[in-house]
Image (cartoon, rainbow, N blue to C red):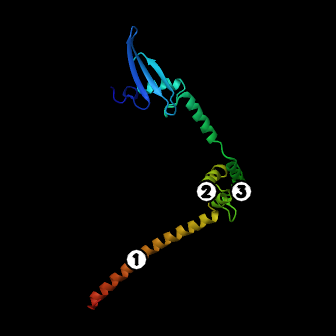
Amino acid sequence: MARGHDYMDGVRGRSWSSSTGTAGTVFKARIQCGQCAAADTVQLRHVITPRHIDLKFIQRGWRIPPRLCPACAAESKEKKSMASKPSAGAVKATAKMFTLLSQHFDADNGRYVAGWSDGKIAKETGMAPEAVTEFRREAFGEIKEPAEFALIRADITTLEKLVIDNHASITAEIAKLRGQLAKAVDKMGVPA
């Protein structure tokens, strides 16, 4: 038995058989649906990789993975498309969110009017705050910092630089005065 060949190893709903006849050796690869009892077989003239065998079943309508026959694959696809349709409540909440964003978010300036935020809109609509934030970013844009905040930040940076510069010069002046004191003490012979 081959190792790592799902069909020859007989694992994951797959199996392998061979028979010798007048036309030579015929190989048969079989797969069974992981959801129902349906099975299918393909005949091969020579040994090929498990992936290539899977592709032959996929051409017949199988879904691999998760190993679904054509009927179960179609049913699964239908369920998935139904599940992706938003509920009426979700549609109403999204519409309300859009309305509130339109009324309370200034996209040009990138700011909410006083008292409004992503969190407040989430609370009003019953939506997750992350969903409101993502929608606002995509549809209305990022929140921008007011110009006065930038000016205050610039003033803070200037003052911090001034403190650093003055600290260095004051520390140097203190060191200079200590040096003068030490010389005077030594000169006079007075204990420090």
Q: Looking at the picture, which amino acid does disc 1 mark?
A: Thr
Residue drawn 37% across the image and 82% down it: 177
Rendered view: 188 above or below 139: below
Quarter-wise, where is residue 84 in the image? top right
Q: Residues within 10 Å of mark 1 (few under 14, many from 20)?
A: few
Depth check: give the residue in front, 45 or 189: 45
Residue at the spot of label 3:
100
Q: Residue 129's mark? A: 2
Residue farthest toward the top in the current orientation of the protein: 22
Return the x and y of residue 154 as percentages of the image width and height. Answer: 56, 66
Task: Say whether residue 67 is left or right of residue 49.
Answer: right
Return the x and y of residue 58 as percentages of the image width and height. Answer: 51, 26
How many numbered marks are there? 3
Ranked by sequence position, the earlier of labels 2 and 1 is: 2
Residue at the spot of label 1:
171
Residue farthest toward the front in the current orientation of the protein: 37
Return the x and y of residue 85 as percentages of the image width and height. Answer: 65, 42
Rendered view: 148 above or below 142: below
Depth check: give the residue in front, 93 or 42: 42
Residue drawn 57% across the image and 66% down it: 153
